[in-house]
Image (tube, helix red, strand yellow):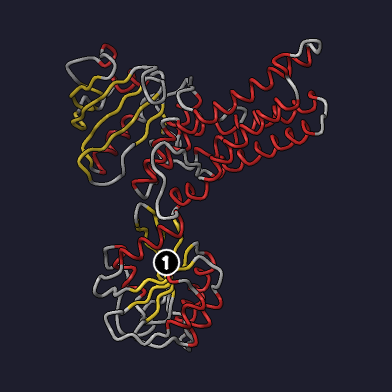
Amino acid sequence: MYSDTIAAISTAVGEGGIAIIRVSGPDSIKEVENIFKSKIRLSEAASHTVHYGHIIDPRTKENLEEVLVTVMRAPRSFTTEDVVEISAHGGVISVKRVMDILLQQQVRLAEPGEFTKRAFLNGRIDLSQAEAVIDLIRSKSDRAFSVALKQVEGTLSRKIKDLRHTLVETLAHIEVNIDYPEHDVESLTADFIKDKSRLVMDEIDKLLKTAEEGKILREGITTAIVGRPNVGKSSLLNTLAHDNKAIVTDIPGTTRDVIEEFVTINNIPLKLLDTAGIRETMDVVEQIGVERSKHAVNEADLILLVLNASEPLHPDELELMEQIRGRQCIVIMNKMDLPTQLDMEILHRYYPPELIVPMSVIEQEGIDKLEEAISNLFFSGRIEGGDLTYVSNVRHIALLKKAKASLEDAYEAAEQLIPIDMIQIDVRLAWEQLGEILGEAVGDSLIDQIFSQFCLGK
């Protein structure tokens, strides 16, 4: 437990109905009581109760703000410490007045993520659950939120603990066999070690199979909308974003830079990049935009190649299709409301029919087909639901791969009938690597790095 008391604003700064200031630490109740005037003393209040009153200046007794104060006594709080939450009016000035007077007490401003860090260090949650909190905050789709919520609730933690329990049992049998070689405990043999190693490796494989989809749900798919000028790229962005984010005109070269927008399609978050039309140009500013477009294409996970179906394929488009051959790409045949002049035979040389989507952005036709094509390309038509545990954190993925490699070494050693005390080293290493996912035996620098990514007040 910490010896000092911290405070921070836990709601977004700005105008709103309510702003919440969170205080946590051994003296949180006493310090808030010093500046709170009500019919009841907070030191006498029961846990998880709400009290009406005013924040006052303890020197002048002037009322500074009308508030509701919630008391949560240790250990029944998020940090397992005494926690007080002050609900004030959601204005910049009102919150500033409360924070200023609060920080004049024996209270310091919390560091980013320090409330969650205290919850972890005080044993309320493990490190994987703490990391899931930031994923919960940053979720860009309902499915991403659900995945993060399951991790906060401990689905991944329980899975990892089960795998570590299997390895602990294996280590225990190895220890007994080493200490008492005259006793063949449960017929401990190389086959037994191989069976246990294979069991855990198979479960790790199941988790790693979700990694790609989990990272997509967590970070989104970087999607570049590319094509020649005036094929409808900006109109497509505006349609998918349900807003006029990009300027749309009949003048070629209107889009001079890369425009970013987050959208959600079929519960899949996309980071859309509307790029400048790729063409040869003498305009210096447009040239810069074209170069940035090419860079965006190189960095994208998905390319939406927009073509004008009412015109024959242009040499620039054929060159572009050659450049992006082999990349994850969906072709959008826009302007299908006009007579079609595009040569489908040439197009089919580059892309199968399922990756070619006929659309009319101006008529709002074909959007559902585009959504289906994106879903099919990345999730085989659907995102798994139910109790599937997704792994989305890069650190977790790396540690799972290391643990699997250690178990592969143990399996190979058992096959070669290497002495079991040598095999024990690899099994224990896998057990420790899985433990790092939960935050066991991790350094302070890693913990500080993880929690520094959090916002203040969380």
Q: Is residue 104 visible?
A: yes
- Find residue 381 and report its image quarter: bottom left
Query: Which residue is at 79% across, 24% downward?
Result: 420
Amino acid type, residue under disc 1 in the picture: Leu
* 305 vs 23, nearest the viewer: 305
Q: Is residue 443 visible?
A: no
**Residue of label 1:** 273
Q: Is residue 328 above or below residue 121?
A: below
Location of the C terminus (image quadrant): top left
Query: Which residue is at 52% across, 39% downward?
Result: 450
- Find residue 186 and report its image quarter: top right
Would residue 57 appear left or right of 193 to someone viewing this image?
Answer: left
Q: Position of residue 179 (x, y in %)?
A: 78, 12
Q: Is residue 316 above or below residue 69?
A: below
Q: Position of residue 158 (x, y in %)?
A: 49, 28
- Find residue 409 and report its image quarter: top right
